Amino acid sequence: MVHPQQVYQERRDTSVPNEQLWHELTAEQKMAFYRLQGYGYRLLFIRKVYNNSLAIVAQSQQLAAIDREGNIDLDPQLKIRA
């Protein structure tokens, strides 16, 4: 039996429009992203785990993460599948 918290929606091979991603961000994440956007960062995706969301943004090969409270991690320890 699969525990409900272990059920994840598989989104490989599907693209989510940026407008939809934008609406899924918290107000704090939006404000933090505005600051990073000035440096050329773009919103890649939102990783949802349990009741938490982590916005993943990138500038060239540099990844950054924005947590639900708007805290920016410029050196996140993330494993991203290609």
Image (cartoon, rainbow, N blue to C red):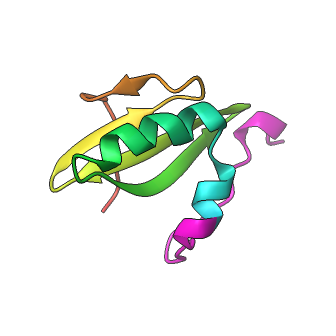
Percent x, y for residue 30? 54, 42
Percent x, y for residue 57? 36, 48
Q: Residue at x 36, y 38 (%)?
A: 35
Q: Residue at x 54, y 49 (%)?
A: 46
Q: Can you say which quadrant of the picture contains the C terminus?
A: bottom left
**Helix, strand or loop: magenta stretch:** loop
| Magenta stretch in the rendered image | 1-19
Q: As displayed, is residue 67 above or below residue 45?
A: above
Q: Residue at x 83, y 39 (%)?
A: 4
In front of the other: 67 or 28? 28
Q: As displayed, is residue 51 above or below residue 40?
A: above
* Residue situated furthest left in the rendering: 61
In front of the other: 80 or 21? 21
Q: Can you say which quadrant of the picture contains the N terminus?
A: top right
Q: As displayed, is residue 78 above or below residue 70?
A: below
In front of the other: 7 or 33? 33
In reply to whether residue 9 is colored magenta, the answer given is yes
Judge whether residue 3 can be spotted in this image. Answer: no
Q: Quadrant of residue 66?
A: top left
